[in-house]
Every structure is written in C-alpha cells, then in structure tokens.
Image (cartoon, rainbow, N blue to C red):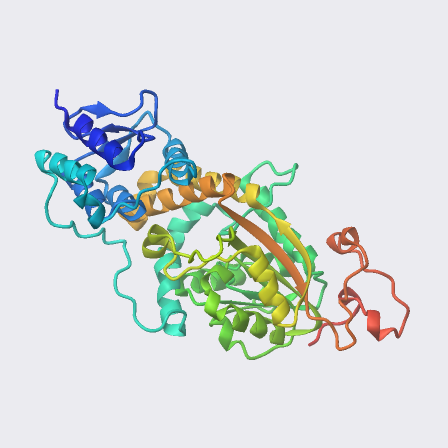
C-alpha cells in the first residue's frame, strides 16, 4: 500500500506545529491522522494542488465543490466541520499564517518536497464554475447588488422548493414547543413577525426582500393587511406573483421587481425586513435604515431579522469569508447586533425589543440539509452537482457556526415615534406580543396605539 497520506499529514503537522484534527485518506488508499477522527478523502492529486495554491478555507471549498475532496462515507459532514472549526478557533494553539511565503521555511520546504514526491505540484487548477469571478461596478451599487442577488437566489425555484419545503421560507424558523415539523416552525415564525408588528385588518405592510412571498401571504390571509413585497430576484418575483394569484389575493398583495431604495409610495404602517439586511453592506447600512424610517408612518413599526457576527478585538479588520463571498452571498456582510441597533437609532428609530434566535437557526439549517440530502439526485439534476455541493457545504457549515456561537441571528423591533415621542406600543411586552391593544383615553394623540388607528391609507 502507498504512503501518500502519511507523507502529507506528517509534513502538514510539522508546518502547523500540532496534530491535524482529521484523518486523511489519499488517492492511493493510504490513511493517516488520528484514529477515530472524522475522515476526508483526497480523490486525486488535484485536491492537494488546490490546497497548496489556496491554503485554508478557500482551497478546501474549491476542492469540495469540485469533487476532488470528499467526506468519507462513514463520516458525518457536521463532524468534519466541527473538528475543523474547533481546530481553527483554538486560541491556545499556535496559529501560523499559511501562505506562499510560509512555504520558504524548513517545514514549508518539506511540505513542498512531499507534494513533489506525490506528483501534486503543478499549475493552479481553475476554480469550479460556481465561483464568482469578475464583479462589475461599485460594491452595493444597484447594478452590482442585482448581480449578487441573482447569483444566490436565481438558482431555480424548484431547487429551493426541494430544500425549503412547501413553506418556501428562506430564513430562521421559530421552534415553539408545539412545532412538530419545519412547516410548523416556519408558520410560527411568520406569525411571530406579524404579532410583533401589530398587524391589523386594513393596515399597509411593506416586506423588503420578500423572497417567494410567504410573509405577505401569511399577513394578508391571517391579519387582513394590504401588502407590498419587493425583491430584485427575477425568479423569486415570478413565483411570488404566481402564489399570490393562486391564493386569490392579488387585490391585496402587490409583488414588485424593485430595489428597496426605489420604493416611492410610503408611508406604510409596518415594514418587515427578513434575511435581507445582510446584503446591504456596512457602508450603506445607515442609508438603508433611514430609507425604511422614511417609508414608515409615525407610530409605525419595523421588524429587522438579521444574522449577526461577533464583535472583533480592537484594531482587527473584518474579513469576509472567502467561501461565502465567492460561492454563496457575493458582497454579503455581517455586523454585530450592537452595530445594527446603533444604526437604527441613528436613523431615528426607537429600538424596543431584541430577540436572539441563534439555536433556532442551527436546527432550521439542519432541516434544510436533510431535505437536500433526501432529494440529492433531483437537486443535482436541477442545479448541477457543483451547485448542490455548494449549498450542502454552506448550510451545514452555517449550522455549526450558529451552534458554536460564532454567529447569531436577531429580530430587532423598532418604531418610528410620533412627533410627540409616542411609540404606539402597549406598555408591556406580553401585551404587544399577544396582539392585545392597550385601551387608551379617546382623543389622547400622544398615546395612540398603532393597532387602534386606521391605516395610513
């Protein structure tokens, strides 16, 4: 039997200064690494070449998406990701930079010598076709945002239906004790948003980044609102319009292919933004918050549902995940929840509630991965093997990141106060969450509850 795995693992461990967290099976059948550790398979020399040219996350992603690197059949992908994450985040261990210059030291030279013996040194392999290459225009310009959104969301509605299930909700579900399925949990999440917004019959709702229309459909059916949903994904808009027509709600719901910055017809009684603000960018976030503030009527509420990263140590620059940026959400950015709250307040909002749903998203992502794996042949037929592998890796890695508290997800409820400073909310959280309107004295405009007044239209 060959010795490729032993040579490779030995050279890598010398370079890193500690044992690797995975067992490696090379293309010659040899194995090395800790016994009992999650096992990855290097199917060919090209897998190693990808890792030599792009050490770290990007090289691993390229190798996996292309199929040059596999997870062993008896190994759980989540175990691999958890082991790699723990290894990378171990603050007590040495953390060498691995790049071209690091190959010039003695350990690096030995790694390159091993790669030469393995026949793995050669030209940089072309990235998989699913990787974003050239980007046109200024980051977060409307043109570039449309291209980024199209890359992620215009994969095919049938593909997303396999992953998301009948709800077609692509955001964190809300796992109440009574939830028996993903569909139950997504319905609970939609209703939680509607209750936080205090929706009542006749009110006017704007859903920014409306996806396939699930929230506006729920709000119109169960809370009697008139709704406008906007998205810049052509495929999302097409299916959302179809779903609205099939539900017989075209007279109460309008779906627009429109950037939120182009919405001209406020005011609205309520605005929801669910899983959209991650696309805005930190440089544009205050403008985003101000525009939503301007679209709301005084006393109106905003529900901002957004993934958050952890704050960085002073002086450390934020770096986008190269895998997420090139394969999943081009130009996407995460901010700490404190930064989000501060920007909303700078825009004139009063933040009234923040609810963390981190554990809920880990469970949701595992459900989506299970759906994808259960329909794998069909998913590959619809989107291609590379794209299906991107989604499997991205969702599984995201689940681990939520579970290990590397990222979070928060619903921030904010209001646009009236000129007199009234929030329009009942005095206690259980009241407004239950949708119970406080009884106010007639004519007391300073304490007018949003649920007690007619729509702005």
Q: On the image, which quarter does residue 26 sit in?
A: top left
Q: Please tell me which residue is depicted at 12% across the width and 39% down the height of the picture.
A: 120
Tell me where residue 189 appears, x and y as whole percent.
61, 49
Residue 150 seen in the current view: yes
**Residue at image coords 59%, 46%:** 357
Could one spot residue 215 in this view of the protein? no
Question: 18 above or below 320?
Answer: above
From the viewer's perspective, tell me whether residue 352 is left or right of residue 68: right
The residue at 54%/41% (across/down) is 182
| For residue 170, above or below residue 453 | above
Most foreground residue, 185 or 117: 117
Relative horizontal placement of residue 374, taking residue 286 as reference (left or right): left
Q: Nearer the viewer, residue 136 or 116?
A: 116
Considering the image in quadrants, where does the C terminus appear? bottom right
Q: Is residue 232 left or right of residue 224?
A: left
440 up-or-down from 378: above or below: below
Residue 361: x %, y % from top left: 53, 44
Which residue is outermost to the right? 441
> x, y percentage for residue 389?
31, 44
Q: Residue at x 31, y 29 (%)?
A: 19
Q: How many marks?
A: 0
Q: Please, which residue is most extreme toward the front here?
A: 106
Q: Nearer the viewer, residue 443 or 409?
A: 409
Q: Quadrant of the N terminus?
A: top left
Q: Is residue 209 left or right of residue 75?
A: right
Tell me where residue 451 sits by quadrant.
bottom right
Q: Quadrant of residue 217?
A: bottom right
Front residue of 218 and 195? 195
Image location (x, y in percent) of residue 381 = 29, 46
């Amino acid at each position: 039997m060959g010795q490729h795995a032993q040579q490779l693992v030995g050279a890598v461990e010398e370079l890193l200064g500690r044992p690797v967290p995975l067992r490696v099976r090379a293309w010659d059948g040899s194995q090395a690494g800790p016994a009992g550790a999650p096992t990855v398979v290097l199917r060919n020399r090209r897998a190693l070449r990808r890792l030599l040219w792009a050490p770290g996350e990007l090289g691993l992603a390229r190798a996996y998406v292309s199929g040059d690197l596999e997870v062993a059949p008896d190994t759980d992908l989540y175990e691999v990701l958890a082991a790699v994450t723990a290894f990378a985040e171990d603050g007590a261990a040495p953390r060498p930079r691995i790049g071209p210059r690091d190959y010039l030291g003695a350990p690096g030279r030995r790694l390159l010598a091993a790669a030469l013996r393995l026949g793995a040194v050669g030209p940089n392999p072309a990235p998989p076709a699913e990787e974003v290459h050239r980007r046109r225009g200024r980051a977060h310009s409307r043109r570039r945002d449309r291209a980024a959104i199209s890359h992620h969301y215009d994969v095919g509605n049938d593909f997303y239906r396999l992953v998301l299930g009948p709800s077609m909700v692509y955001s964190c579900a809300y796992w109440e004790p009574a939830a028996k399925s993903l569909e139950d949990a997504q319905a609970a999440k939609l209703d939680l948003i509607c209750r936080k917004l205090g929706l009542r019959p006749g009110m006017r709702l704007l859903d920014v980044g409306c996806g396939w229309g699930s929230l506006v459909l729920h709000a119109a059916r169960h809370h009697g609102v008139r709704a406008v949903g906007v998205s810049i994904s052509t495929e999302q808009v097409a299916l959302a319009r179809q779903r609205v027509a099939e539900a017989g709600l075209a007279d109460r719901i309008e779906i627009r292919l429109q950037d939120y910055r182009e919405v001209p017809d406020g005011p609205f009684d309520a605005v929801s933004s669910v899983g959209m603000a991650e696309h805005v960018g930190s440089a544009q976030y205050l403008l985003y918050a101000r525009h939503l503030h301007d679209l709301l009527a005084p006393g109106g509420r905003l529900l901002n549902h957004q993934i958050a990263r952890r704050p960085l140590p002073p002086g450390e620059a934020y770096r986008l995940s190269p895998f997420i940026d090139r394969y999943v959400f081009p130009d996407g950015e995460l901010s700490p929840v404190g930064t989000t709250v501060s920007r909303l307040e700078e825009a004139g909002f009063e933040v009234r509630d923040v609810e963390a749903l981190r554990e809920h998203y880990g469970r949701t992502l595992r459900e989506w991965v299970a759906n994808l794996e259960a329909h794998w042949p069909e998913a590959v037929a619809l989107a291609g093997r590379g794209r299906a592998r991107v989604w499997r890796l991205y969702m599984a890695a995201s689940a681990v990141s939520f579970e290990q508290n590397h990222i979070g997800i928060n619903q921030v409820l904010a209001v646009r106060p009236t000129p007199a400073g009234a929030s329009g909310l009942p005095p206690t959280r259980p009241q407004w969450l239950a949708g119970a309107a406080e009884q106010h004295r007639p004519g007391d405009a300073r304490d007018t509850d949003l649920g007690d007044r007619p729509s702005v239209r």
